[in-house]
Amino acid sequence: MTTTSDIHNNPPYAIEIENLTVRYGNKDILKNINLKIKYGDFLAIIGPNGSGKTTLLKAILRIIKPDCGTIKIFGEEDINKIITKIGYVPQRLGFEKTLSITVREFLALRLPKTKNWFFHRFKFIDEKLKIARLGVTELLEKPLYLLSGGELQRVLIAFSLLGEPELLLLDEATEGVDFTAENLIYESLATLRKQIGLTVILVSHDLSMVSRQATNVVALSNGVVCCEGSPSEVYQSLNKAYGAHFITYSHHH
Ligand SMILES: Nc1ncnc2c1ncn2[C@@H]1O[C@H](COP(=O)(O)OP(=O)(O)O)[C@@H](O)[C@H]1O
Ligand SMILES: [Mg+2]
């Protein structure tokens, strides 16, 4: 497989995290996290509520400043140098949903050629979306405030992919998305991983989806990595430690 790493002769890891600690006040939220993620990997981060999953994504993006440790993305410690290569769909968007713009106008903001022409109609968004194959074409003329929660998530994922990221961070991004649309999303992520070596980090409670899609899993508990490996390795050792209770926290459609 040709990956971004081969093309650009980049370092072997898309992301390297060493001794990462994040504190809120005097409470350690993430404690001494070490992670290496290869180009084109699909890493799923799982763990109970409050275990630090969102904080880890925010630290990777430097939305939160780490108290200790280093984070390199594409070999670079300075986030400003690679920020345009990163797509991010946050868990909860501080988003003015009553904003009276259509999905088409919103998505146009993400494209260099159309971002300054806000209120015009653009055929080529349809072209791009066909490529992304996220099934949002039928939503294009809808105002954002009429979208259901799941539809809004689909639009936000399409928005992040229009930026053609090399690294995509998704924080419970398919919450509320129906099964068919969810499959379209994961199919297009798999295609992008093959085609451009897209690296994906995803936070999810949906263990069956994680076992189908992820190449690697990291389980967080109380701000530490309690388990990591392939989905089956991680599930087996969590099952040993927590038994059937663990499985019941899987999310069902
Ligand atoms: N801005 C904040 N100030 C103080 N504590 C926070 C803040 N954001 C998150 N926390 C705490 O950090 C811990 C981890 O939160 P978070 O990363 O959101 O967990 P998860 O995404 O795994 O549910 C929780 O105990 C949460 O209460
Ligand atoms: Mg979270």
Image (cartoon, rainbow, N blue to C red):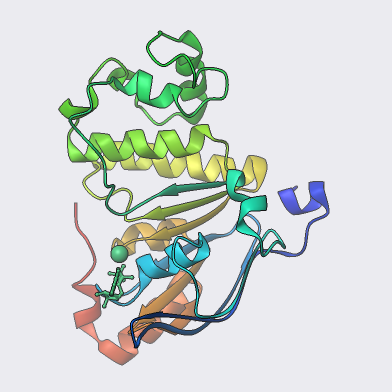
Q: Is residue 163 above or below residue 215?
A: above
The spot of residue 62 in percent (x, y) is 50, 62
Residue furthest to the bottom in view is 241
Q: Quadrant of ligand 2?
A: bottom left
Q: Is residue 198 above or below residue 137?
A: below
Taking 197 as reference, is 215 left or right? left
Along the viewing direction, whichever of 186 and 224 lies nearer the viewer: 224
The spot of residue 124 in percent (x, y) is 51, 13
Residue furthest to the right in view is 9
Q: Residue at x 44, y 66 (%)?
A: 64
Is residue 182 visible from the viewing direction of this image? Answer: yes
Q: Based on the displayed image, in which of its 4 quarters is residue 196 positioned?
A: top right
Q: Residue at x 47, y 9 (%)?
A: 123
Taking 182 as reference, is 243 left or right? left
Taking 222 as reference, is 56 left or right? right
The spot of residue 195 in percent (x, y) is 65, 40
Q: Is residue 88 above or below residue 27?
A: above
The spot of residue 205 in percent (x, y) is 28, 64
Q: Residue at x 44, y 21 (%)?
A: 108
Q: Based on the displayed image, in which of its 4 quarters is residue 212 positioned?
A: bottom left
Q: Based on the displayed image, in which of its 4 quarters is residue 19 positioned?
A: bottom right
Q: Is residue 182 above or below residue 202?
A: above
Q: Residue at x 45, y 56 (%)?
A: 213
